[in-house]
Image (spheres, helix red, strand yellow):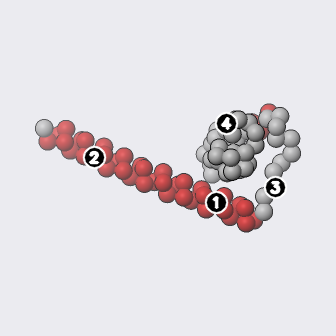
Amino acid sequence: MPRFDRTGPRGDGPLTGRGLGPCGYGDRRGFGRGFGRRQFCPFLEEPIVITKEEEKELLKGDIKALEQEKEYIEKRIKEIKEYIEKKNNG
């Protein structure tokens, strides 16, 4: 939440980011840097309750983000392999 206004990274509302903020829900995917620091955020006075449908959409977003990360990692591995081959071949 860049402006600390509880609107999320793109203004979509809370719980729409990756949980990397100072009050992040670092336990959502095992990533994030929240690590229980949420209690120190004055603007999150009460827990946010989401419905099963909202949770389902959040999880779909997590899947999409993981797929994008996987694509990037595979692309980077390919670039590194090509670099090594080029370096070894002269």
> Residue type at mark 3?
Val
Contact between labelled residues 3 and 4, with CB atoms less than 8 Å apart: no
Mark 2 lies on a secondary structure that is helix
> Residue type at mark 1?
Leu
**Quadrant, the N terminus:** top right
Q: Which residue is mark 4?
A: 2
Q: Nearer the viewer, residue 28 or 48?
A: 48
Q: Which residue is mark 2?
A: 81
Residue 45 x/y as whole percent:
86, 41
> Residue type at mark 4?
Pro
Mark 1 lies on a secondary structure that is helix
Residue 18 position (above or below residue 49): above
Tag 3 or tag 4, which sits nearer the N-term? Answer: 4
Q: Which residue is mark 1?
A: 59
Q: Which residue is mark 3?
A: 49
The residues bearing labels 2 and 3 have C-alpha atoms spaced at a distance of 46 Å
Instruction: State the residue at coordinates (75%, 43%).
Output: 6
Instruction: State the residue at coordinates (79%, 35%).
Output: 41
Q: Residues within 10 Å of mark 1 (few under 14, many from 20)?
A: some
Residue 51 position (above or below residue 26): below
Tag 3 or tag 2, which sits nearer the N-term? Answer: 3
Tag 2 or tag 4, which sits nearer the N-term? Answer: 4
Tag 3 or tag 1, which sits nearer the N-term? Answer: 3
Contact between labelled residues 2 and 1, with CB atoms less than 8 Å apart: no
Instruction: State the residue at coordinates (61%, 62%).
Output: 60
Residue 56 x/y as whole percent:
68, 64
